[in-house]
Amino acid sequence: MRIVVIGTGYVGLVTGTCLAESGNEVTCVDKDARKIAVLESGRLPIYEPGLLELVQRNRKEDRLHFSTTMSNALEKARIVFICVGTPQGDDGSADLGSVWAVADEIADYLNRGSSRTTPLLIVLKSTVPVGTNRRLQERLSQRTQNRFDVASNPEFLKEGSAVEDFMKPDRVVVGVRTRYAEQTLRDLYAPFLRTERPFLVMTPESAEMTKYVANAMLATKISFINEMANLCERMGADINDVRRGIGHDVRIGFQFLFPGPGWGGSCFPKDVQALIAMARANGMSARIVESVLAVNEAQKRVLGNKIRAFYGDSLKGKTLAVWGLSFKPRTDDIREAPSLVLIEDMLREGVALRVHDPEAMNNVRAIYGDRLIYCDRPYGALEGSDGLVIVTEWQEFRNPDFELMRRLMRQPVIFDGRNLYDPMAVREYGFTYFGIGRIVPEGPASRSSPD
Ligand SMILES: NC(=O)c1ccc[n+]([C@@H]2O[C@H](COP(=O)([O-])OP(=O)(O)OC[C@H]3O[C@@H](n4cnc5c(N)ncnc54)[C@H](O)[C@@H]3O)[C@@H](O)[C@H]2O)c1
């Protein structure tokens, strides 16, 4: 099939590339000329594991193309996916400006009296409030007499494993009103669902809502375990033991129940806000979801509060190393990342920050410039530091050389925002350790310094 994907960000680029990989001819369109130029030069504007190889292969096979304009590509396309951003608006609801801009461009194309034999299927993959597909249908109907169809197809991929998630989805959800739309999408997704993964057909309203409910549920799990971790800390229980104690109950499970410094990213914060706004607009308050958000806002300050409590009045002028800046591992995305809250907080306190992240440094540098010290290597960040703060659980931070760390640091203190280390073991190396909801042995180092 010939396909156009509009919006070549994390979702659009992965969608377009994976659809090309299954034999379709795909044109990815973005209004950001710089992004398209980077892609045309054979590089990626984002970091996503495994994506570069797929992009290069499909470009070489002439199945994947990039453009800043959509009209030529639409001429022969059977499906157009809208994958533009839907950021949070001023009142918390999703800002659909980009969606409508794209819709109007598609209407202009349809109006030019193209010689289509089949209707153009317009698929909304961006996360959009319930009712947006209907509004899209109405908006287009007012602007064109030409044949088209509209469908919802929310995306559930996760940054960091986006290619894998798209290639082997847990499920594909489509919201349709016609057999044509259903069958076209069923055919398109068939290669990805060969191992009996479900293709779930529902109304566009239910499909739109499914995406918000999925994200709200996941955010709820994290905020819940964070709240319980904070309570554990006050009561002398260890959240890691409690987590294991509850997770073996299959009704609860282990996934998404790891405490940390709060959730961030390009989706949860804005989608949770949008769900709250949708509830308000419909005359109810989503009280659980509102609490989930409030708990998270407080959780993003937990590391800063622990740091303040430890250094007290001597915090100003200290140097801290920060490991991990992206909102989660295996991505360069820093949108709403807890690291940004910590950085702001510590800069305000007059702390010097030596930061390291395997992929997100350029994005952070674009915000903070020379207000931070950027270190290419994790150990480099530790040199002369009065403490280490771990914000993101990149794999390479899990098993470091504690002896070397201790030698490099001025003060052996670790604020472990992801509970990567065993408090007892770290203490053996002479570190003072703070986790999230852990039982931490009292007092500083027990083993003498290697020096
Ligand atoms: N990032 C994720 O993990 C993820 C997962 C599932 C769903 N989503 C949803 O998918 C949508 C896209 O998210 P993303 O993270 O890929 O966003 P993104 O910001 O990475 O990419 C959006 C792209 O759309 C382009 N764009 C905006 N207006 C345009 C226009 N008029 N014409 C052409 N291009 C235009 C932008 O230049 C940008 O490159 C959002 O609704 C998001 O909520 C994201």
Image (cartoon, rainbow, N blue to C red):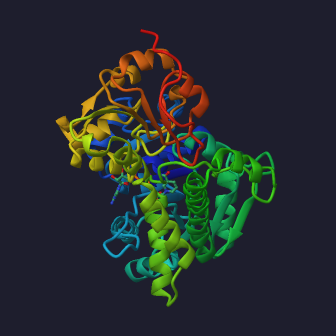
Q: Closest to the observer: 216 or 122?
A: 216
Q: Closest to the observer: 314 or 37?
A: 314
- Residue 359 visible? The answer is yes
Instruction: Judge left or right: residue 187 versus residue 352.
Output: right
Q: Is residue 431 placed above or below 178 in the rendered structure?
A: above
Where is residue 305 drawn, in percent x and y?
A: 38, 51
Where is residue 383 drawn, in percent x and y?
A: 32, 21
Q: Closest to the observer: 259 or 217?
A: 259
Q: On the image, which quarter does residue 386 sit in?
A: top left
Determine the residue positioned at 81% across, 55% down.
Answer: 249
Query: Which quadrant of the picture is home to ligand 1?
Result: bottom left
Give the farthest residue toward the left.
Answer: 370
Instruction: Judge left or right: residue 178 versus residue 52.
Output: right
Instruction: Judge left or right: residue 40 versus residue 5.
Output: left
Count of picture labels:
0
* Quadrant in the picture for the C terminus: top left
Where is residue 401 drawn, in percent x and y?
A: 51, 17
Determine the residue positioned at 57% across, 45% down.
Answer: 19
Q: Closest to the observer: 81 or 443?
A: 443
